[in-house]
Image (cartoon, rainbow, N blue to C red):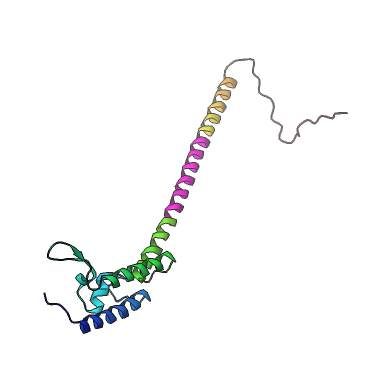
């Protein structure tokens, strides 16, 4: 692989810086992201130039554009920490995650409400069944010979009142 000239490197760095500014301003191309891969593609340079290399003896050396990749990542992280997401797709993903979280909370609250109403319904039905059984027992007592008498039902009469004087 041939080495690039200083002029080519300067031109590539200027192109990379222009693309960094565009990406961080939110001008992300369709199908792209605010990442190194899109940065390299839009600047017209090989992506491998953004990563460290190894010398022949195995010692590490920085890639020719690694400092720009680090600056890009640092600025991108800084924007995200302040709440600005330059990538519209990533912003949409974050918004949808928040929406899903809210919907999950609402669903959990509704499930709890439904569980409470189901418990209440079961309690109410058991009370109705107990009252019905008591009414049937009392009717059976009335029908059987015993010392229980039925009181006359007077529709027009009012309940007796007491006067406490």
Q: Residue at x 44, y 49 (%)?
A: 108
Using the rendered image of the protein, determine whether residue 27 is visible from the camera's viewpoint. Answer: no
* Quadrant of res 127: top right
Residue 125 horizontal side relative to residue 142, left or right: left
Q: Residue at x 23, y 68 (%)?
A: 62
Residue 113 horizontal side relative to residue 1, left or right: right
Which quarter of the rendered picture does the C terminus lie within? top right
Extreme residue toward the top, this view: 146
| Residue 155 located within the stretch drawn in magenta | no
Closer-to-camera residue (70/57): 57
Q: Position of residue 163 (x, y in %)?
A: 84, 30
The stretch of residues the image draws in magenta is: 103-125
Using the rendered image of the protein, determine whether residue 143 is visible from the camera's viewpoint. Answer: yes
Q: Position of residue 1 (x, y in %)?
A: 11, 74
Q: Position of residue 80 (x, y in %)?
A: 40, 66
In this picture, is 134 found above or below 83? above
* Quadrant of res 47: bottom left
Q: Residue at x 57, y 24 (%)?
A: 139
Extreme residue toward the right, this view: 165
Residue 126 horizontal side relative to residue 13, left or right: right
Residue 122 horizontal side relative to residue 41, left or right: right
Q: Position of residue 5 (x, y in %)?
A: 18, 82
Q: Could you tell me what secondary structure mostly forms the magenta stretch? A: helix
Number of numbered labels in the structure image:
0
| Residue 106 located within the stretch drawn in magenta | yes
In this picture, is 76 found above or below 134? below
Closer-to-camera residue (151/16): 16
* Quadrant of res 85: bottom left
In this picture, is 114 found above or below 150? below
């Amino acid at each position: 692989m041939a080495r690039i000239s200083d002029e080519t490197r300067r031109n590539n760095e200027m192109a990379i810086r222009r693309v960094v500014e565009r990406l961080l301003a939110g001008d992300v191309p369709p199908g792209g992201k605010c990442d190194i891969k899109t940065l390299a593609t839009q600047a017209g340079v090989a992506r491998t130039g953004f990563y460290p290399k190894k010398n022949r003896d195995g010692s590490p050396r920085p890639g020719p554009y690694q400092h720009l990749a680090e600056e890009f990542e640092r600025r991108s992280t800084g924007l995200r920490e302040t709440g600005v997401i330059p990538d519209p797709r990533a912003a949409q993903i974050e918004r949808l995650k928040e929406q899903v979280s809210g919907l999950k909370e609402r669903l959990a609250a509704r499930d709890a409400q439904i569980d409470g109403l189901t418990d209440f319904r079961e309690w109410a039905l058991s009370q109705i069944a107990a009252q019905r059984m008591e009414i049937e027992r009392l009717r059976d007592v009335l029908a059987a010979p015993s010392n229980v008498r039925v009181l006359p039902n007077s529709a027009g009469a009012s309940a007796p009142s007491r006067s406490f004087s």
